[in-house]
Image (cartoon, rainbow, N blue to C red):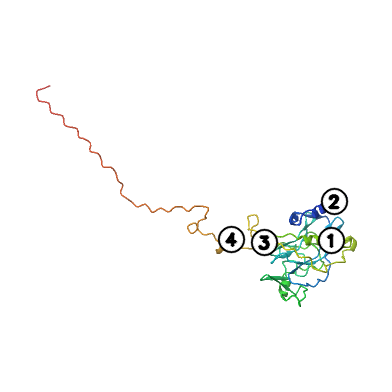
């Protein structure tokens, strides 16, 4: 049974490598045992503006769990934010949900990766006028080069999920118990960009490193973070995805009917172009009915009286 499971996971891992990055979002890796705890490490200094931090995580390959070092990655487009991947427990298995780029931070299982990814949303910075500003309360940046910085401890405290045991998965026994918030649900249904080719090469390099595997390092990887930023890879921003019936707005948001700005106007005010407006006719005025004049029927002529005496 264990041999069959190992063979299945090995084939699944090979399939994951062979599939292009753009289509990997639909691929799931399931494992029967939990990933190791998240190691504690120091974030490298951000050396230049426009770099986004992608936290390290435990991935799974043919030889078990291996550590993918955290890395500074140039944003693939202006306004891009990185939602980390996470392990989630479901049906007795641990399933990997891949990270992605998008206009907002989505759900990543409540896993506290640190450095702005405190479990809910992102406290490490914001885009302002096409330039990313770093929150140095949680980000380690070179302020002599990067001048778009600020300090906000409040957002850090409000979005932090305490994880003293450094658990690396959501749900199940001993896992983080956090369900998606309304904002995370909305972000999950937006149009996303899969990890770039450069990011995938970074993962493959970690998979090829024997020292990155938990069975070899005892859960304490030697390389916790990449020393240099990854290469830039530009992509167009994903087109906004229209809300459909299959992706309704979160329940915490008022329904469109309760918002005056979105209330449908009566048909008498505006009529959809696809349906022709009914033609307006003037009200019919009451007119006397015209009837043809009655025809005068010829009266029967009276019969001449018979002379008396004739019978």
Quadrant of the drawing holding the C terminus: top left
Residue at 85% x, 50% y: name it: 7
Q: Which mark sits nearer the N-terminus, 2 or 1?
A: 2
Position of residue 285 measured from the top left corner of the image (x, y, whole percent): 35, 52
Outermost residue, left side: 309
Q: Secondary structure at mark 2?
A: helix
Q: CA distance from mark 4 to mark 1?
A: 48 Å
Real-space Cα separation, disc 3 to disc 1, in angstroms: 33 Å
Label 3: few (<14), some (14–19) or many (≥20) C-alpha neighbours in 10 Å: some
Label 2, residues with CA under 10 Å away: few <14, some 14-19, many ≥20 = few
The residue pinned by badge 2 equals 5
Q: Of callouts 3 and 2, which one flags the residue occurring earlier in the amino acid sequence? A: 2
Alpha carbon separation for disc pair 3 and 4 = 15 Å
In primary-sequence order, the first of circles 3 and 4 is 3
Report x, y in % for residue 33.
84, 57
Residue, far top: 311
Mark 4 or 1, nearer chain start: 1
Which residue is denoted by mark 1 in the rendering?
205
Dot 2 or dot 4: first in sequence order is 2
Q: Of callouts 3 and 1, which one flags the residue occurring earlier in the amino acid sequence? A: 3
Where residue 79 sits: x, y (%)?
Answer: 69, 66
Q: Nearer the viewer, residue 169 or 205?
A: 205
Q: Which residue is mark 3?
A: 186
Q: Could you tell me how far apart the alpha carbons at marks 2 and 1 are, in whole angstroms?
A: 25 Å
**Is 130 rendered above or below residue 62?**
below
Q: CA distance from mark 2 to mark 4?
A: 48 Å
Dot 1: few (<14), some (14–19), or many (≥20) neighbours within 10 Å?
Answer: few
Mark 4, residue position: 256
């Amino acid at each position: 049974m264990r041999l069959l499971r190992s063979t299945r996971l090995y084939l699944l891992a090979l399939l994951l490598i062979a599939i292009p990055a753009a289509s990997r979002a639909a691929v799931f890796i399931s494992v029967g045992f939990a990933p190791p705890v998240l190691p504690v490490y120091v974030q490298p200094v951000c050396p230049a503006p426009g770099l986004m931090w992608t936290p390290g995580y435990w991935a799974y390959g043919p030889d078990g769990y291996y550590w993918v070092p955290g890395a500074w990655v140039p944003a693939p487009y202006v306004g891009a934010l990185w939602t980390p991947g996470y392990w989630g427990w479901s049906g007795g298995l641990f399933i990997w949900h891949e990270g992605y780029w998008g206009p907002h931070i989505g759900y990543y299982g409540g896993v506290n990766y640190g450095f702005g990814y405190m479990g809910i949303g992102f406290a490490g910075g914001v885009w302002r006028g096409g330039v990313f500003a770093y929150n140095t309360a949680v980000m380690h940046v070179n302020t002599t080069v990067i001048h778009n910085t600020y300090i906000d401890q409040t957002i850090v405290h409000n979005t932090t999920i305490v994880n003293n045991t450094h658990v690396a998965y959501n749900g199940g026994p001993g896992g983080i118990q956090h369900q998606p918030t309304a904002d995370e649900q909305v972000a999950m249904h937006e149009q996303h960009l899969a990890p770039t080719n450069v990011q995938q090469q970074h993962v493959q390099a970690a998979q090829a490193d024997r020292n990155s595997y938990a069975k070899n390092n005892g859960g304490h990887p030697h390389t916790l973070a990449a020393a240099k930023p990854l290469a830039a890879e530009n992509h167009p921003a994903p087109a906004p995805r229209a809300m459909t019936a299959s992706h309704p707005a979160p329940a915490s948001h008022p329904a469109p009917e309760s918002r005056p700005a979105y209330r449908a106007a009566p048909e008498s005010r505006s009529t959809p172009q696809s349906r022709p407006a009914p033609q307006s006719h003037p009200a019919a005025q009451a007119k006397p009915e015209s009837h043809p004049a009655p025809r005068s029927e010829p009266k029967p002529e009276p019969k001449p009286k018979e002379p008396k005496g004739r019978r």
